[in-house]
Image: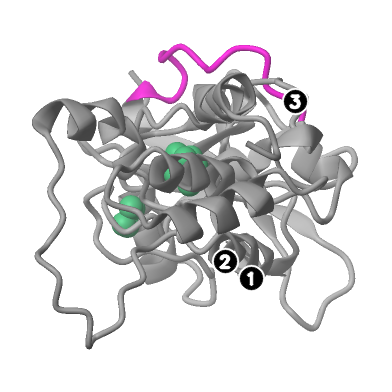
Amino acid sequence: MSDVYKFLIYRKKSNETESRYEKFEVPYRKGMTILEALFYIQDHFDSSLAFRYSCRGAICGSCGLTVDKAPQLACRTQVSSVKTSKKPVKLPEFNFGDHIGWNEGDEILIEPLPNMEIIQDLIVDMEPFWKFYKEVEPYFAREWKDTTPESHQSSEAAKSIENLVYCILCGLCWACPVNAEKKYYLGPSALAKGYRFIADNRLSEEHRQEIKQKVWDEDGVPACEQFFVCNRVCPKGVKPGTAIKQIRDKWSKDE
Ligand code: SF4
Ligand code: FES
């Protein structure tokens, strides 16, 4: 085993028009994650390397990036497993620059998440992701004066939407080819969140109808082309593509 890990990293400052790729070598350490390797590079070679993180424990959803052309969480991906682990199949080919000279067998390629504007280096603008998420209104709305007893949910009902609750809003599923093509596509996670609330028995009927109208908008469920890339890349097993299919199968637009 080599005593260093080799990285090829996408770089672009906010004031630059051209991107480039830079090579770095990080000493081998057992159990090192991609996020820790980025810290090492920042500490030892280039303090300006920009990337996001917060929890370091696959909870906050901040550290999404593309590793060897597969969207992943930097804090959850072990460097030693990048070349040996099975990649999600049938992902679209993401290419941020031409002729990057990537030695695929030897170098770990780190790029930003696809289909989002790049702000700097590995940091992308997630504003559209949040905007569409908010448009679905994925929350319980209750007037503070409303003193009716709390609503209950059976354990079976909770179980039926449990995997959808695990979404950490990391944006990895924005790698969907429809997001690449359609600027206004609500995206897999927002639609999955819509399903999570529509299917929740505690939601008011009025709010349920509002969310249904939104997810059935032409930029919502009808725009999904059922690639299921979202299911393959999601680090939390949310299966947003399956949730979108369930919306199609269970509820018509005007129901
Ligand atoms: S559905 Fe999965 S990939 Fe998409 S934002 Fe949620 S956790 Fe991330
Ligand atoms: S740092 Fe929070 S999910 Fe990776």
Tag 2 or tag 3, which sits nearer the N-term?
A: 3
Magenta residues span 81-95
Residue shown at 59%/29% (left/top)?
A: 251
- In the depicted structure, whether residue 196 falls above or below residue 30: below
Look at label 3 and name its amino acid: Pro
Query: Which quarter of the rendering shows the C terminus?
Result: top right
Q: Of the residues tagged 3 and 1, which is closer to the observer?
A: 1
Query: From where the camera sits, is residue 117 visible?
Result: yes
- Label 1 and label 2: CA atoms lie apart by 5 Å
Residue hosting label 3: 92
Mark 3 within 8 Å of ligand 1, using the beta carbon: no
- Circle number at residue 130: 2
- Label 3 and label 1: CA atoms lie apart by 23 Å
Secondary element at tag 3: loop
Residue shown at 29%/43% (left/top)?
A: 201
The crowd level at tag 3 (other Cα within 10 Å; few <14, some 14-19, many 20+) is some
- Circle number at residue 115: none
